[in-house]
Amino acid sequence: MEDSEPPLHHGNEMSCTSPQLLKPPIREAPREVLPVFWRQLLLKANEKGILTHEACHPVRDTRLCAKTGQHGVHFDYVISLELASIELWIDTGVQIVNKRIFDQLHKKRKIVETRFNGELSWERLGTRRFSRIRTFAGHGGIKHGEAHWNILQDEMIGLMDRFYKALKPALAQQI
């Protein structure tokens, strides 16, 4: 690469300039249903003992964030009409710091993905300020209605549990 920046670290062959990464074809979920979706997800997660987001409250936003103990780095549940994902969002407000955190985590990629028991999407995102690591739920987004939410929420909770357990030890070494 021209700017000697490490390449995009991704579980598949997408490039940093891929429109699928930078501008996914996602329409936002209607804001009025989001608190209902998040309330149900949080209740289910608490019942299952998955407490990563126990301090969170249902919001009218497409993401539900939980602190990691490191400024600007958080575990997120993300929902749109068509997609659902679990992310480690890295945005301290300083691009060089974000890239350093990402690069340190990426050095532990094999260990993290072994703990997760699958590939993750490692998105350094070149010139953008933030970076992220994420995985997608296979049951789509919120558009299928409340009858579908149960399956989707169960999948998201299971993914968050594995994702958190895979990344938390690597994050703890950064603090």
Image (cartoon, grey):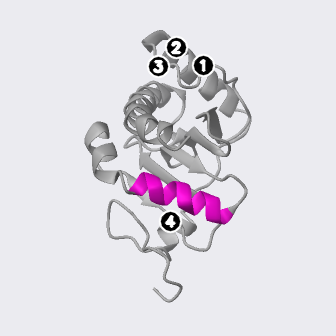
**First reached walking from the N terminus: tag 1 or tag 4:** 4
Q: Which mark is residue 46?
A: 2
Mark 1 Cα shell of 10 Å, populated few (<14), some (14-19), many (≥20) = few
Q: Nearer the viewer, residue 167 or 125?
A: 167
Q: Tell me how far mark 2 sits from mark 3, CA to CA.
A: 6 Å
For the residue marked with disc 4, what is the amino acid?
Answer: Leu
Residue at the image position 51 percent from the left and 49 percent from the top? 82
What secondary structure is the stretch in magenta mostly built from? Answer: helix
Residue at image mark 4: 21
Residue at image mark 3: 50
Residue at the image position 53 percent from the left and 25 percent from the top? 52
**First reached walking from the N terminus: tag 2 or tag 1:** 2
Q: Nearer the viewer, residue 114 or 24?
A: 114
Which mark lies nearer to you, 1 or 4?
Answer: 1
For the residues bearing labels 2 and 3, Cβ distance under 8 angstroms: yes
**First reached walking from the N terminus: tag 4 or tag 2:** 4
| Residue 5 in sight in this render | yes
